[in-house]
Image (cartoon, grey):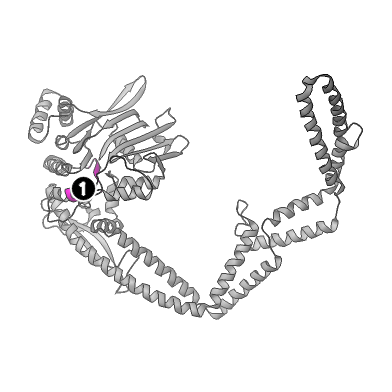
Amino acid sequence: MLDELSIRNYALIDSITLSFRPGFNALTGETGAGKSIIVGSLSFLMGGKTETDVIRSGCEEAGVSAVISVKKNNTEIADWLKSRDIECEEEVIIVRRNIKTSGRGSAYIQNVPVTRQDLAEFMGLLIDLHGQHNHESLLRKESHRRYLDRFACIEDEVNQYYKKFIELTDMRKTMEASLKSDREREERLELLYYAVDEITKASVRAGEIRELENESQKLSDFEKLAGLIHTAADCFIDSEHSVLSLTRRAKNALDSAQAVDASLGEIHRRFENLYYEAEDIAGDFRSYRDNLSFDPQRLEEVNDRLALLYKLKKKYCKHAQDPQGQGNDEESILSYRANAEAEIEALCNAEKNREKLKTEITVIEKDIVAKAQSIRQKRTTAAGKLSKLITGILQQLGMPNARFQTEIIPKQQEGQTTIGPWGAEDVEFLISANTGEPLKDLARIASGGELSRVMLSIKTALLAGEPEKTAAQNIEDTRGVETLVFDEIDAGIGGEVALKVGEYLTQIGKNKQIFCVTHLASIAVRADNHFKVEKKTEGGRTYTGIGPLSAEGRRKEIARMLAGDAGEAALAHADDLMSRYGKRSG
């Protein structure tokens, strides 16, 4: 359950910390007050993608954090945290995320850094957020299969089937490649043998190109190098006024000076070190100068060797044609040889491997067929339950004649039943909103209000158990997600239907924590806790604020929602509505 939410420098919000209670929480406010900002900040905390424009103007960073309580028996949360060595102290989780104007951001669970993907995965176990954009996913037929699999609790089984199907697809491609003509195989072998022989004869060594390039540059610029070395020698060791000669004379003078004034001891010690270091450098320098010689034959050998290595690099390094390419050239050449040798072995044993592969494909095909049949049975069983459950929920939400059906459609190819990466069937949701109307695509629902209620039904059904139970019993029996957020689920509805939706949300709120952004007084009046979102201007800046309403504050807000003001007639209407459906406590 979401206990506390803190928002800092997010959009029009300066700094807000909110405490929440269980049950049905309503968020209301005038259009443009910033209700969507509250939902957006929660989406950000849940790992949603975002841009730097969410950072409040003039600020360097935006951040959202939350304190979330979890139940002891929630093994899914416990296992997730344990697998990542994150402690859950006193059944409380602290989650935070921030983003800087540079675009860099960070996320933490219990002060342990996590990736955005991990954050989204974890928060998805705690909070389910439904916004208006989710209607789009409901209308896509490819999402219907995922909804059904989630309801049937077979997502892991279907993912394992998918991996097996992809493995079979890859093996079939390998088999197809192995069945190429002998001539193609011989041509490939000839090419591979040549490459292996060429690389082996070259005796390529890691780091060799860099070494040879340095040596080539030295030999090519020998005349310049020799001139520079002789100039340096004249300054350092050869002339009467060389560095070494002058240093030696200075040392001798300081030796005598120290005998006269003992306070020169530290300076003498340091200069003595300088002199000995100069002598060491002089010795190394003489050795380098005396061994400096030009060998035109060696230059030719180096350039010939480099030419060979450059040729191999161009032929066998994938990044050789890319000026931004990265990697060790010699290791890439040797890696190419290793891969070529492995391919030679595979091609030489093609017949033997082909028979082995054929046997493996047969085994996997049987396994996939069995898995597909198992998935079909579970989908078929779950489809009937889901259809019955959603139909019942829709009837509770003011669609008494609605009929929802989860259609299982066998995959067909050229008149034959076939299987695909997600099973042997497609799944499609169909609905008839009124008596006598045929079942049709969800996309053909004309009313936005009907679509909102279908989404609400599916969302709650995915949390449910057996359709024979009531909606409240279903929600009570579920594990995992404790908090559901509905952003303007009341779009396109009103009157008696709005009362039904409010009643249904109240039912769910008895066992789950519900947040609902609404414009309808008939829904807000049923909330256990009521928050108002307001936009204010102070000191030339605009702020969005939110806070819980007192009993009187709530009365005035309900009146505003009913009539646009808090006049006597509106207040009387609000009192009547609250006496029948709501609560006066804040």
Residue 79, horizontal then vertical, whole percent: 32, 50
Frontmost residue, 207 versus 261: 261
Q: Is residue 393 above or below residue 335?
A: above
Q: Quadrant of the C terminus?
A: top left
Residue carrying label 1: 456
Q: Which residues are magenta?
A: 475-491
> Horizontal placement of 178 versus 434: left or right?
right
Q: Residue at x 29, y 71 (%)?
A: 370
Residue 494, horizontal then vertical, whole percent: 15, 40
**Magenta stretch encompasses residue 487:** yes
Indicate the secondary structure of the residue bearing disc 1: helix
Q: Residue at x 82, y 23 (%)?
A: 258
Frontmost residue, 469 versus 564: 469
Q: In this rendering, does residue 411 appear at all?
A: no
Frontmost residue, 356 versus 412: 356
Residue 235, horizontal then vertical, whole percent: 86, 35
Residue type of the residue flagged with mark 1: Leu
Q: In the displayed orientation, state which residue is furthest to the right.
A: 240
Count up the numbered dots: 1
> Horizontal placement of 227 versus 325: left or right?
right
Q: Residue at x 18, y 31 (%)?
A: 561
Give the image quarter of residue 55. Answer: top left
Give the image quarter of residue 330. Answer: bottom right
Q: Quadrant of the N terminus?
A: top left
> Horizontal placement of 170 versus 36: left or right?
right
How many residues crowd around disc 1 within 10 Å: few (fewer than 14), some, or many (20 or more)? many
Q: In this rendering, does residue 166 appear at all?
A: yes
